[in-house]
Amino acid sequence: MLKEKKDIRKLDLAALKEVCLEANEKAFRAKQIYEWLWKKAAHSFEEMTNLSKDFRTYLETHYVINAVTIDLEQKSQDGTVKLRFKLHDDHMIEGVLIPADERMTACISSQVGCSLTCKFCATGQMKRIRNIDDSEIFDQVVLINRLSLEHYNQPLSNIVYMGMGEPLLNYAQVLKSVERLTAPEGLDMSPKRITLSTAGIAKMIRKLGDDDYKGNLALSLHAANDQKRSDIMPINDQNNLAALSEALQYFYKKTRTRVTFEYIIFKDRNDELEDARELARFCRKVPCKVNIIEYNPIAGADFLNTSEKKLVAFQQYLMSEGVTVTVRRSRGKDIDAACGQLANKE
């Protein structure tokens, strides 16, 4: 009976040296393999041309690279590109390339599905099937970067963990992927170009502070009132605003990184001046900025986008209270690639 091949990307440099010695190869070959995997993002042993053919055959016989592939590509009228990725076990996830004048942003997934059931989100209507490995997160970035170069002749400038899933419920693999993306022997990106977006897991936000996380943090807030937030996001029942406020203060004290509050503005739910007043009060508790986001309708949810008049009044009130505010217009709506719309639909 054939032994199952091991995933070579689960091995660190020390383990790769053992692989080389077992194959009667010099230990320095381990560094070459590591570089092929994480700096050059090789998806096959055949690409590793500075290794002998015999050694490549040995690696092929005993190990596997569980590479992510592109299953479907859709381009929006506004230039946004959505990708459906196929994982080695045939599960599907989605990622998005969002082009803008000054930046090229990859929106990537951290789980197959999601367990949080946020009522406005298409991914929240799916079941969580499994967490995504750090190498599968890494591959999403590599593939979207190639696409960015192909379509726009520009490399990625920013990465946001805002696709399918809750990053802080896949904590170890997500942080390992950030390490891969920022390490000099990986893609060598600046951590300040990376943003984790969470629905709000207070104890894991504190852990980010303890673990010296160097990237940015965004919190999907959507209401600064416990009753309203729990209605929109059931996770608020276990992670209420008081708990989140304490966790964010702790995170800021540890990292000195200003938090971003994501606030999708819904018609007749969280778009009144009283909602803006509550948000301004919450913003005083921790150094932050606010992104107001247009809602992107999904099937099976009874949420609607607010009027432009209310959106402007909301923004102006926050600004009058000294809050830094940006309105984020939706991108890729026509291909279900906008915020909250990722659900593996064609």
Image (spheres, rainbow, N blue to C red):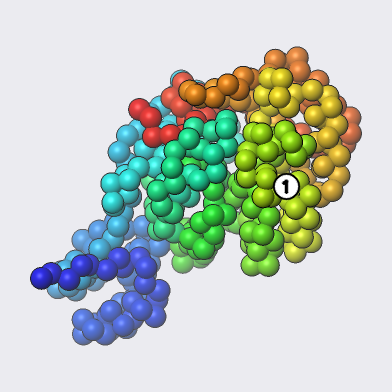
x, y percentage for residue 215? 63, 55
Q: What is the secondary structure assignment of the residue under circle 1?
A: loop
Q: Identify the residue position indicated by label 1 in the image.
A: 240
Residue 247 or residue 256, whichever sits in front? 247
Q: Quadrant of the N terminus?
A: bottom left
**Residue at image point 65% right, 41% down:** 220
- Give residue 30's quadrant in the image: bottom left
Which residue reaches farthest right? 321
Q: Quadrant of the C terminus?
A: top left
x, y percentage for residue 343? 43, 34
Type of amino acid under label 1: Asn
- Give residue 11's quadrant in the image: bottom left
Count every numbered label the image shows and give the total: 1
Image side of residue 342 versus residue 102, left or right: left
x, y percentage for residue 228? 72, 33
**Residue at image point 49% right, 24% down:** 300
* Residue 105 visible within the image: no
- Residue 80 vertical placement versus 130 (above, below): above
- Residue 274 vertical placement versus 212 (above, below): above
**Residue at image point 71% right, 20% down:** 268
x, y percentage for residue 259? 72, 48
**Residue at image point 46% right, 27% down:** 336
Q: Residues within 10 Å of mark 1 (few under 14, many from 20)?
A: many
* Residue 239 visible within the image: yes
Image side of residue 196 versus residue 278, left or right: left
